[in-house]
Amino acid sequence: MRILGPVLTAHYLAAFTALGMPVFMPRVLASLAPGAPDWLVGVLYVLPTICTALTATTWGRLADRYGRKLSLMRAQIGLAFGFVLAGFAPSLAWFVLALIVQGSCGGSLAAANAYLSTQSQGKSLSRALDWTQFSARLAMVTAPVLLGLATGMGLTQELYRYLALLPVLALALTWTLPVDTVSSQPAKTQKASAGAMVPGDRRELKGLLAVQFLFYFAMVVTFPYFIPYSEQLGVASDSTAGLLYSLPHLVYLLVLPWLRSLSPAPQRPLLAGLGLLAAACLAHGLLSQALWLAPARVLYGIGMLLAFSGINRSLSACAAGASAGRLFGLFDACGKWAGALGGIAAGALVHRYGLAMPFFIAAIASAAALGTASLLFLSLKQRQTYVSASDA
């Protein structure tokens, strides 16, 4: 906890900064560039995500070479600088540049996970990765509420200036953490350990990346139009709709501290989580009234929690030695691309087929992730059986 506590606090501050303002992008754009087309909101919403996806792997390699703590501090400085630029942007072009800086120089989740991999391994690392997701969920629940109060007081673009202080505070916390020594390893050792990040061969790593992509896509494609969808079912209050939107994240926050596992193996939680997520998304799409929406959201949250837990266990098994920065950067980029595609797909699906269609597509993506994960674990089991028989 001496290390995990500051890392989680710093990550929460960075996540609060990065995840809070995109929700209020329409108001910021209206004050900065009145008369801008509506489609520009969607472009600006995903722009930092795309920039992070493009740069995450490169930052991961540099973290392996120069140190994961340094990379974490770099992400916090980049986030602060991007928000300062956005807060003082005199024009739309300047604001776009600020979003590019924010996304290209950010990536605090991957940097935090890579740093934690230098301080713990195995089951303790997978548990630490669960807690970084906890801090991200906490930011997703609290940031829209608190920043909504601020925008209600008339603050819009200037909020970026105040929020830039949060990653600076995160930087101060990170400064006190122990320095990892990965950069002192010889180049040959780094290359040799790079193979340790795959659980057998590159095909298995690609399978895990496919599971990650499908899982993230299934989640994100349901996010943008949930409020209008709940209103279509009969939810009349904005506050109730917002609570229902946040309910899966609240489930994660409430259940994770009590979640205990008898085995560090990822198979059970990942397969169960993806199955529950598929069932929950299908239930969302089939609803005709709001009465059953809350139970479906709870089931969605349990599935999300278990799936995250399984993926984190798989990642902790892959993360070893000098390759951890590249590994977490690769998985972060995969998740970001899935999120960007999910946001774009949601708009196209709703426009063509209606508000329920993103949930049906999410159910299909979750089922595909479940099938991919099942094949992945089956191949791993066969490999282990073959090696055991050979050794005997």
Image: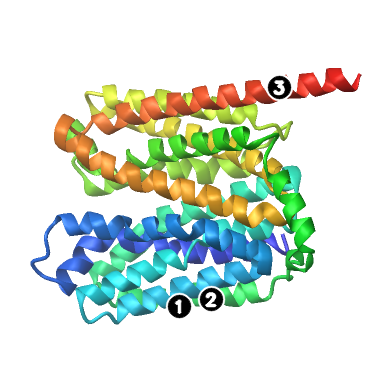
Quarter of the image that includes the N terminus: bottom right
What is the C-alpha distance between the residues marked 1 and 2?
6 Å
The reply to whether dot 1 and dot 2 touch (C-beta < 8 Å) is: yes
Q: Residue at x 15, y 33 (%)?
A: 352
Secondary element type, mark 3 = helix
Label 3 crowd bin: few (<14), some (14–19), many (20+), radius 10 Å: few
Q: Nearer the viewer, mark 2 or mark 3?
A: 3
What is the C-alpha distance between the residues marked 2 and 3?
46 Å
Residue 6's image quarter?
bottom right
Quarter of the image that includes the C terminus: top right
**In the image, 327: left or right of 47?**
right
Q: Name the residue beneath numbered marker 3.
A: 381
Q: Amino acid at mark 3?
A: Lys
Between 140 and 36, the residue placed more toward the observer is: 36
Between 316 and 12, the residue placed more toward the observer is: 316
Q: Name the residue beneath numbered marker 1.
A: 165
Q: Residue at x 81, y 23 (%)?
A: 387
Q: Is residue 129 above or below residue 231?
A: below
Q: Residue at x 46, y 68 (%)?
A: 105
What is the C-alpha distance between the residues marked 3 and 1?
49 Å
